[in-house]
Image (cartoon, grey):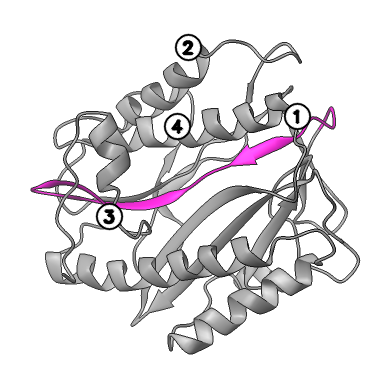
Amino acid sequence: MVQIKTPEQIAKMREAGLVVAAIHAATREAAVPGATTRDLDQAARKVIADHGATSNFLGYGGFPATICTSVNEVVVHGIPDDKTVLKDGDIISIDAGAIVDGWHGDAAYTAFVGTGHAPELVELSRVTEESMWAGIAAMKVNNRLIDISKAIESYIRRQPRPATGKYGIIEDYGGHGIGTEMHMDPHLLNYVSRKRGKGIKLVPGVCLAIEPMVSLGTARTDVLSDDWTVVTTDGSWSSHWEHSIALTEQGPLVLTAPDCGRAKLAEYGVEAAPDPLA
């Protein structure tokens, strides 16, 4: 069953989303050469505590940290530690979440550490982020889940191929419903699969985490011996972007974006729903 939220519940999810946005701001500032991924986790813990929220990552299935820190070829679920020291030229995807009064927020972004990044890495992050926004723009009343998948995949496939030859849309991980739990039905693929059908009809109150993951090579992944860290099988570097979104009568509301997604959605001709906390 897909959980349908009331406007009041969506407002609570917006509170959680703003905590996640604050975590992103703090970890962006902390993601500098010489910092460890544990340093970023400590910055996230402080934000959560300062906002009176709780972490939905810490302890989830035994996960030992408050954020995921995925560096270079790590696609997702990287565990912060003292051994991973960020270097000039690295890229890092930071996935963060928070709970406020039982309601969850979840979002991710890719950051560039230092300077001197290859153009194909800059473009990889841009393509991944923009495919996310294309998917968000397709989150319209009476569309189907497949319309979001199609928008994400179509955007990526339309882009010029990188020097490495192709973009790999990660197959084993995707978006999901979110609400009173971090991961809920429905599962959202970042590509179209005939086996999955059209998926649910999108109605007001549906809340989704839309999160494309794209590599500069393969779509295939392995999980390391820690049972968490997911890497590309060919060692190609990857990018991960995510927002939590509520569909309302007034359109999509990007719960984890400070401006509710207004500026980016306008580029796609879509008006974001008003902020319920304004």
Q: CA distance from mark 2 to mark 4?
A: 12 Å
Q: Residue at x 77, y 38 (%)?
A: 116
The residue identified by callout 4 is 130
In the rendered structure, which amino acid carries the disc numbered 3?
A: Cys
Whether pointer 2 and pointer 4 mark residues with C-beta atoms closer than 8 Å, the reply is: no
Q: Give the vertical position of 253 relative to 53 (above or below).
A: above
The residue lying toward the viewer, choosing from 75 and 45, is: 45
The answer to whether marks 4 and 1 mark residues whose Cβ atoms lie closer than 8 Å is no
Q: CA distance from mark 4 to mark 1?
A: 19 Å
Q: Secondary structure at mark 2?
A: helix
In the rendered view, would you say 90 is above or below 42? above
Viewer-side residue, 38 vs 104? 38
Q: Residues within 10 Å of mark 2 (few under 14, many from 20)?
A: few
Callout in the foreground (4, 1)? 1
Residues in magenta? 233-253
Q: Residue furthest left?
A: 249
Q: Are marks 2 and 3 in contact (CB under 8 Å)?
A: no
* Direction right: furthest residue: 83
Query: Which dot marks residue 158?
Result: 2
Identity of the residue drawn at 66% across and 60% down: 68
- Would you name the residue on which mark 3 appears? 260
Mark 1 and mark 2 lie on one chain; the one further toward the N terminus is 1
Q: Nearer the viewer, mark 1 or mark 2?
A: 1
Residue positioned 37% across, 66% down in the render: 17
